[in-house]
Amino acid sequence: MSESNQADLEEFTAGTTTETVVQTVVLDLETSQQKTERVRAGVEEFQAMAGYMADMMPSIPEWEWSPQNNTLYQMVTREFEDRTVKATTAREAAQHVAESFSSWRSRGKDGNRPQFGGGSYLVLSHQDFELVENERGYGLKASFIPYKPVWFHIEPNGYQRDYLERIFEDDADTGSCELHVEPDGSVRAHLVVKWDVEVYEPADVTTTVGVDIGENVIYAAAVVDGDDVEDVVVEPGREFRHYRERLEDKRERLMEQGDLRGVRQTRGERERYTEHVLNTASREIVDLASEHAPSTIALEELTGYRETVADPIHDWPYAKLQEMIAYKAKATGVPIEMVDPENTSITCRKCGQTNREYRNGTEFSCSRCGYEIHADVNAAINIAQVEKT
Ligand SMILES: [Zn+2]
């Protein structure tokens, strides 16, 4: 490791704190009619037990509303003597309801009391599920029925695979796991995953990655330290625009032909493609910040202007991309700052002059100092340099 890297690293570790990131991952499980029926039966019992417990809670003294209270669990097992699910599942139902009620109480009983019984999920106790890695990839063993575990193959997408890898590399722990049966009969696991990240204090950091999202390009990012621009990345998104336009044309054609199924499919295709592009873009931005660590990412506070502006890339999901950046940054330990974007797109980053006319599409040209630059890069640099409050 070079000397300068060493110095950076020391600076990096000087102001860090450890934070636990908690994230729920929704996993698609490969199921059969028989497996789905078993889960559905388990869900029905779990919901009946939770509904019963919720009805009983108002008649139980509040100081007994604790998830650890065994009396609640005994009430459930007495009432549901003929249940087919395990006692541990009944315990989960009691704890699940008690947790909700005690948190409702700690919120000053704001709103209606918690309702249970109509849900489409069951909660697996920690000892009743196991994630395994096998020749087919990943699997989940759910043991909510005595002596009859139900095995599922997991079909993870890109980011879900990341989490599973984290778990098997022992970088992450699992929290609770819920099994959900969807109306169409598909079965999903909602798995809580927790891991620790080192987060450095924004106060110690002088490098900022300013991000300008989606006026002409998918994003423009500028790595700025004081007055030095260290790096610039622009993701033009031409391909993205063409593809979306093609899908839009296709959708209109199918609409005219009255092919509603085709319209739905096209919409689904468009959503998946957008999701993929958002995932890639947010990953690139967070990677850029990591390469320049320690750094913070500056994003624009979304204003009414942003939400209502006529969008050249068709309903570009600004908020969604920001959310994904913020989420991935948190998982990596990079702090995020939201800044007021006022005038950042029409101010010359060289001389500081603000003039709406300097900006023309992707071109920014300052007639005061003669500076010329890609308009979105100019905006990204300004966003990085906005005074932090
Ligand atoms: Zn200028």
Image: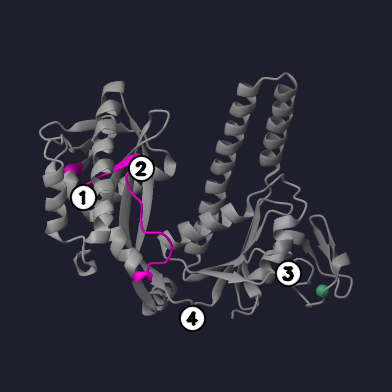
User: Which segment is the magenta one?
Assistant: 106-129
State the separation of the CA atoms marked 1 and 2: 14 Å
Question: Considering only order in the chain, which callout, 2 or 1, is on the residue closer to the N terminus?
Answer: 1
Residue beneath disc 4: 203
Question: Considering only order in the chain, which callout, 1 or 4, is on the residue closer to the N terminus?
Answer: 1
Circle 3 crowding by C-alpha within 10 Å: few under 14, some 14–19, many from 20: many
Kindly identify the amino acid type of the residue bearing the numbered disc 3: Thr
Q: Main secondary structure of the magenta part?
A: loop
Residue at 70% x, 40% y is 241
Kindly identify the amino acid type of the residue bearing the numbered disc 2: Gly
Question: Considering only order in the chain, which callout, 4 or 2, is on the residue closer to the N terminus?
Answer: 2
- Secondary element under disc 2, as helix, strand or loop, is loop
The reply to whether the magenta stretch includes residue 332 is no
Q: Nearer the viewer, residue 301 or 382?
A: 301
Residue beneath disc 2: 119
Kindly identify the amino acid type of the residue bearing the numbered disc 1: Glu
Q: Nearer the viewer, residue 102 or 334?
A: 102
- Residue 170 appears in the rendering: no
Numbered circle sitting on residue 122: none
Q: x, y (%) of residue 180?
A: 34, 39
Q: x, y (%) of residue 280?
A: 54, 47
Q: Nearer the viewer, residue 31 or 337?
A: 31
Q: x, y (%) of residue 305?
A: 74, 62
In front: label 1 or label 3: 1
Q: Is residue 278 left or right of residue 303?
A: left
Q: x, y (%) of residue 358?
A: 85, 66
Numbered circle sitting on residue 344: 3
Question: Considering only order in the chain, which callout, 3 or 4, is on the residue closer to the N terminus?
Answer: 4
Residue beneath disc 1: 92
State the separation of the CA atoms marked 2 and 3: 47 Å
State the separation of the CA atoms marked 1 and 3: 52 Å
